[in-house]
Image: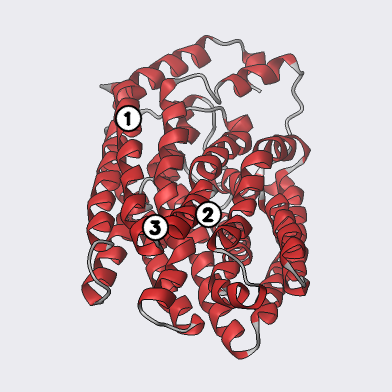
Amino acid sequence: MALHSIAAADYQAAAPSVPRAYAWVVFALTFGLLISDYMSRQVLNAVFPLLKQEWALSDSQLGLLSGIVAVMVGLLTFPLSLLADRWGRVRSLALMAILWSLATLGCGLAQNFPQMFLARFLVGVGEAAYGSVGIAVVISVFPIHLRATLTGAFMAGGMFGSVLGMALGGVLAAHLGWRQAFAGMALFGLLLALLYPLVVRQQRIGATPPRTPRVSGRRPLKTLFSSRSVICAYVGSGLQLFVGAAVMVWFPSYLNRYYQMGTDRAGLVAALIVLVGGSGMVLCGMLSDRLGRGAPERKIALAVAFCVISCVLLGTAFRLPPGSLQLSLIALGMLVATGTSGPSGAMVANLTHSAVHGTAFATLTLANNLLGLAPGPLLTGMLADALGLDRAFELVPLVSVLAALVFLYARRHYLGDIQRLRGEALAAPAGGQG
């Protein structure tokens, strides 16, 4: 069937004219800022034990400090991404990076919980739209058939940034103090933020703000929620990230409590686990593109498989006593737990208009944060206060079952939604393509 070899994006985006070498430069710098984003976000996790001791905080308060960033990302990602689509993606990205870097520096200067909460609030404001606008820039300079790979690889930057944030944060905190850990992350972000607009030129990558009449702009926006498949992509992705976020945020504390590791060693071991998760994003994205080249619905079938396998592996691991077998199963579970990012991103890109890809990925980010990244750490902290962190981790993987059911529903409608959207685009007048 011809539908199997044609993505919905084929009707809405021409092949990129950017030289391949420059496209990889754009990817590298945008990816680097994403790493800075998550270094600034996740360095907090490495210093949880130090803050808990110094300020006498509860696990719920620590979870709130982590979760407030995701809450702000969830609330602001859509309006700020829509603004960036219209005002200019490149300069928007640079301003975002400056804000979150300065706010991270403020975390290092905080003297109490309310001040730290305010600084983390501002980190969330700065980071709100970066992931969605950044991936929109990246996919605009590469061929369409690489979308699952690029989305998985780009989103893996969050995992790699988390690795660096936790590992370097733990080491800096152990040797220099937790304040210097925040300062180091802030300096890295500021340097990249100043370099980015000097190299990535908005006119060169073709990411100039649209200048179409208001009426013609309505049609692209409708594609954000015009199909059951794209809605399922948002929901399924968010539910599955609930599990990954909970493990990523709380695993250093788990190692500290049940393996009696110091903050430096716990940060390094947890960083390795998260690194495996980031690698899984890339590898699973590549696998999805390869197996789904002639049959797009296979990507969704793989997403279902990733959810089920991760639930079994992580659910089994956290019922085992501490030891090498438990750590090995947790690593394998994280390898596939993050694998839905590539297929979800490809679905969103293929089922929405290129003019609003920043806003489309903002919607995906909104779902990821409100369904996964924000409630995951917070609810896990609440469960840890009530039952213990080990018992909380036994329950968290069950959320993957819900994610699998959502992706199964999406698979039933995906090909029909692509066909319908393609037909609507071909029937639309030229003025409505803006």
Give coordinates of residue 346: x percent, y percent.
Answer: 43, 39
57 shown above or below 82: below
Give the quadrant of the N terminus: top left
N-term-proximal mark, 2 vs 3: 2
Q: Position of residue 399 (x, y in %)?
A: 35, 43
Name the residue carrying label 3.
387
On the image, numbered disc 1 is attached to which residue? 5
- What residue sits right under mark 2 in the picture? 20
Question: Mark 1 touching mark 2, by CB under 8 A?
Answer: no
- Camera-near label (1 vs 3) is 3
Give whichever of discs 1 and 3 has the lower sequence position: 1
Q: Label 2, secondary structure: give it.
A: helix
Q: Along the horizontal axis of the image, is 84 left or right of 44?
A: right
The x and y percentages for residue 331 are 31, 66
Q: Secondary structure at mark 1?
A: helix
Q: Which secondary structure, mark 3? A: helix
Q: CA distance from mark 2 to mark 3?
A: 53 Å
| Amino acid type at image mark 3 | Leu
Q: Residue at x 39, y 45 (%)?
A: 240
